[in-house]
Structures are given as structure tokens and as C-alpha cells.
Amino acid sequence: MLAYYDTGEKLFGEEDIFINKCKMKETVLHAHSYIEIVFVSDGNGIHKIGKEDYLCKKGEIYFINHDIPHQFIANDDCEFEIYNCIFKPTFFHNSFIDSKKFYNVTHDFLLKILDGDATLKTPKISLINTNFIYIQTLYEDMLKEYTLKDEGYTEVFKADLIKLIILILRTIKKETIVNSNVYIKNDLLEKAIDYIHCNYYKDITIEELSMMAFLSQSHFCRLFKEYSGMTVKEFTQKIRIKEACRLLDKSNKKIADIAAEVGYNDIKYFLSLFKKQIGMTPTEYKKQNVTTDYL
């Protein structure tokens, strides 16, 4: 039975972030309205999350989503030492970093992980020694800034938390690679593909897509082609021409207007590309009223 539900009002005050460090043998079973990233700096035992029991030990990070009951139970011969970093789902909206791309990737991808996305077997990450030291330093720095509350402490706290989340995303991304470096699923690439689907008519650059996937431009281009079977340019052209076909089927717009609507101001280039992909000109396609499923 769930012991209690914490709204976080006493912890947050007027802020949307909070951190503390504590030692304990056992916590009561509880759920909360905020997101929690727990770092286990010492101890071992059991961490109950939802309906599952996870073996818990030093050097692990746990993601606890809102409304998910959980409880730490240390082994008889030790105590847990943990850092609790909690924040409201609105944290990224209020971040001092003006980046919609960062918000979209982290908020959407992180919450998918918290909700049990298939790319992560458990809601935890086990750190190697070098990452353990770095993570502990980040948590200590956040705790210090939050405790002293010197001028600009919120910005420093949030910068460290962003570093933490990016490191977590990098680690998770590596865990999605199995046998012969084949991706079984890569939400970051899918995010870029979804972005192309929604913004195909714009001048999308490799730079912005690679930023969304937290990859270098060359690495992103290579993985994108492996994942989709096409280059970014080829994929975008397919989406644009498919939409042009839909507009030819469903509207009486002029071909030049349709070309501009799907992202081509050069009508000659559009006509050439359309014929190359569809096998006929837009006028011929319109006359025959062909429905083409070529993607």
C-alpha cells in the first residue's frame, strides 16, 4: 500500500529545483508529483520502483518519474548514501538556456525513458569509475550552490543539471547499440526524422539536425543513412515530393505554388526532381490522378 504522496511544496518553495544528500537504512514507500534523479554514492540493497525490485548499489543513477511509487531498502550491514536532485516538469521551460532544440530533445526523450521506453531495460544507469567521480562532483557542486545560495546560484545549479542530463543521454545512447554496432532503436535519430517530417518545407541544415541528436555532423550523417537508407537530402526530397503528390491529388493549386509550398522556389529544379522520382511530370500526374506509394 502506498504510504504517502509528496507534492514537493515544502521542498521547492518558490523554486522549481531542489537537492539534498542523506544517509538512511530505509525510506517509506511513496510517490511524488515531480521528477527525481537519484545518485547512489554508497551502500547496496533493494530499490523498489513501481512493481519491480531492483538490486541497488553504489555508482547507480535512478530516474523516478512523477506518480511512480518507490522505496529504498538497504542491506542489513550498511546504509544508503544518496543524492536527491528533483525538479518540476516545467524546469526546462524556465531554464536560462534559450534553446528549443535542447528542451525538445531532453524533455521528450527523458520522459520516454522514465515511462519505460524499450531502449532502456531498467530505469537506472550503472556508472564506470571515471563517470562516478564526475557525477559525484556535479552533485556536490549543485548541493553547494543550492545550500549557499550565492548570487547566480540558480544558473550554476541548472548548468550542472544540464551537464548531468547530457551525460545520461550519452550513456543511454551507447546502451542502444548491440551486436556489430547495429541500432535496435535510436530515439535521437527518430527525433530528427520527425523534425524533418514536420518541417520539410523549411531550409533544414545538417548542423541543426546533428545538434538535436547530440552528434557531430559527420557522425550524424553516417548514422542517419545507416538508419534510414538515405541521406538527409534524399530523405527530405522524398517527403517533399510525397507532399507535392498529395497536394496535386487534393487541390487545384498551381504547380508553381505547390513547389513553393513544399520548399522549392526553383520551379525547374522541382519539375526535374518530381519527374525523376515519380516518372512523370506534375501535369501528367495530375491528369492521370495517380496515387503513388513510393516511400
Image (tube, rainbow, N blue to C red):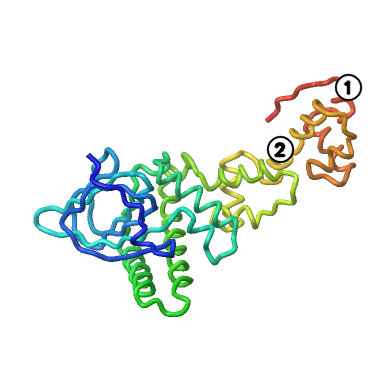
Disc number at residue 100?
Answer: none
Q: Count all numbered tags in the image, as a single digit.
A: 2
Residue 120 screen position, x and y as percent: 39, 44
Element on which disc 2 rests: helix
Q: Amino acid at mark 1?
A: Lys
Q: Position of residue 26 (x, y in %)?
A: 17, 54
Residue 163 shown left or right of residue 281 in the figure: left
Q: Position of residue 105 (x, y in %)?
A: 53, 52
The residue that appears at 87% across and 33% down in the rendered structure is 253
Using a 10 Å C-alpha cutoff, classify the residue at mark 2 as few (fewer than 14 neighbours), some (14 to 19) or many (20 or more). Answer: some
Q: Is residue 154 left or right of residue 130?
A: right
Residue 94: x percent and y percent?
A: 52, 61
Q: Would you name the residue on which mark 2 appears?
A: 239
Which residue is at the front of the view, 101 or 210? Answer: 101
Q: Earlier in the sequence, mark 2 or mark 1?
A: 2
**Tag 1 secondary structure:** helix
For the N terminus, the image quarter is: top left
Q: Residue at x 49, y 48 (%)?
A: 109
Q: Give the quarter of the image for residue 227.
A: top right
Q: Is residue 73 left or right of residue 240?
A: left
Disc ID at residue 287: 1
Instruction: Tell me the amino acid under the disc marked 2.
Output: Ile
In the displayed structure, would residue 263 be above or below residue 163? Answer: above
190 horizontally vs 166: left or right: right
Q: Nearer the viewer, residue 229 or 194?
A: 194
* Residue nearest the viewer, comparing 58 with 216: 58
